[in-house]
Amino acid sequence: MSSTNRGAERNKEDYYVTPHWLVREFLESIDYGGPKCKTILDLGERILDPSAGGCEKYEMSYPTVLNQFNFDVETWDIREDSRAARTGVDFLQAEGKGEYDTVITNPSFILATQFVEKGLEHVRERGLVIMLQRLNWLGSIKRFEFWGKQPLQSVFVHHKRPGFDPENPNKTDSIEYAHFVFRKGYNNLFAPNLYII
């Protein structure tokens, strides 16, 4: 997902490589012993990245960094050329049974609300659904109803704009990004925690 060069130059597969430093920065902000710790979020033991990505040239972003933090991650992707353990899996069609502690990914912007709703089906009660999205995902008339009913617990805004093209690592996106944390069963819909990381 990227907001730069929208239109003709967008990746036709809507596949963008999430920078590892961005995932690491988020994990360090929630890590129990991390020097940059903002809060404590327990990701649990059963973690799923349903849009894991990766390809012949690049590693999967979330699973790679999560492994460095000693988490095991189950990986799915709809793309057949992904490095995920299970490819050809359409997460939005997969039946959720509440078996995971955390679902974490960087979904396509146009499918992000559907990924949250489906993610909540896949996590246990009090489980987490964590999505990387543009900060302006909070806006729009189209998503107003969505925000009124989803259990958004926290928003971790990244102070540095990322780039999603490993071939041009110095080319950053045109907008800020955040990790949005939803907690199944969380009912304080009017006051999510805000962190700048």
Image (spheres, rainbow, N blue to C red):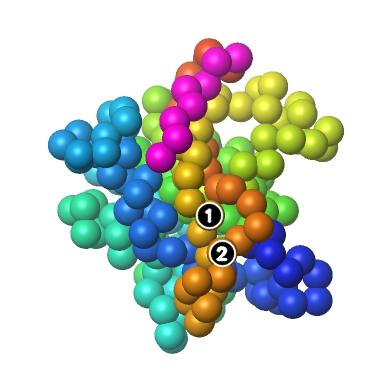
- The structure residue drawn at horizontal position 50% and vertical position 39%, both measured from the top left corner, is 157
Span colored in magenta: 190-197
The reply to whether discs 2 and 1 touch (Cβ–Cβ < 8 Å) is yes
In this rendering, position of residue 48 left or right of residue 36: right
Q: Quadrant of residue 40?
A: top left
- The structure residue drawn at horizontal position 48% and vertical position 73%, both measured from the top left corner, is 169
Is residue 29 one of those drawn in magenta? no
Residue 72 in percent (x, y) is at: 25, 55
Residue 4 in percent (x, y) is at: 69, 64
Q: Nearer the viewer, residue 123 or 13?
A: 13
Task: Please name the amino acid that badge 2 sits on.
Answer: Thr
SS at mark 1 in the image: loop
Residue 148 in percent (x, y) is at: 69, 22
Q: Earlier in the sequence, mark 2 or mark 1?
A: 1
How busy is the neighbourhood of tag 2: few (under 14 within 10 Å), some, or many (20 plus)? some
- CA–CA distance between discs 2 and 1? 6 Å
Q: Nearer the viewer, residue 112 or 154?
A: 154
Task: Please name the amino acid that badge 1 sits on.
Answer: Arg
- The structure residue drawn at horizontal position 66% and vertical position 23%, both measured from the top left corner, is 149
